[in-house]
Amino acid sequence: DPSVLVVTADPATTAGTISSEMAFAVNPFTPGILRVAVYGAYPLSGQGVLLNLHFHTIGSIGSSSALTWQEVLVNEGNPANVATNGRITIAAPTLNEVTISGYVRNAGGDGIPFTHVILSSSGHNRSAVRTDAEGHYIFNNVNPGQAYTVAVGRRLYGFTPMIVNVTNSLSNVDLIARP
């Protein structure tokens, strides 16, 4: 269902699969249909993942899409294969899956190391982390469905706190010092 899933710009990869030495072609141009061909000079052998497919979820929580396989042929049908259809249902992220991360930078764009970053919610829950040597920070296990304030606890520079609404992980929540 193209209202639930869309293919990414790179819809298939073979790295780490049993077809990693083979070539492949994809045709993602018909909404709701992804055509894939994996081919090579030698037949596949062994067991494992054939191909990795990549999608973005765009549907709302609770929406779902059937996954239907058609015309699956491996090694010209010898040995015979069985393709099992499935379904993807969009679920709300869980606590251990959501993160907020970014960099604390000075006005020149350089990372500011070992600086406290404070995350607080409207329920007055508060946590703090320190940036690493490059100025990067990450908050793990963020509760989705809330608004948070991200602020820097450094007096040497002036920072404007950011308010972020969290439904999924956020990266590039960069805090830049005022000049």
Image: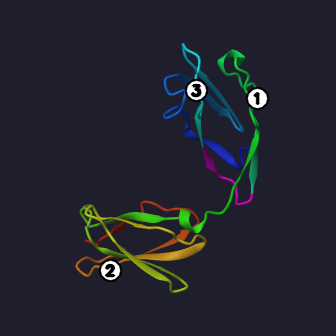
**Magenta stretch: residue 98 in it?**
no
Q: What segment carries the magenta color?
A: 55-62
CB under 8 Å between discs 1 and 2: no
Q: Which residue is mark 3?
A: 46
Res 31 quadrant in image = top right
Give the image location of residue 77, x and y in percent: 72, 18
Would residue 161 be visible to someone looking at this image?
no
Which amino acid, mark 2?
Gly
Residue linked to disc 2: 153
Q: Residue furthest front?
A: 46
Does residue 16 show up? Answer: yes
Q: Element at badge 1?
A: loop
- Cα distance in 3D space between marks 1 and 2: 56 Å
Across and down, in percent, residue 119 comes to: 44, 77
Residue 58 part of the magenta-drawn span: yes
Counting residues from the N terminus, which is met first, the one under dot 3 or under dot 1? Answer: 3
Residue drawn at (46%, 77%), measured in percent from left and top?
149
Query: Which quarter of the rendered picture does the C terminus lie within?
Result: bottom left
Q: Earlier in the sequence, mark 1 or mark 2?
A: 1
Return the residue at label 1.
70
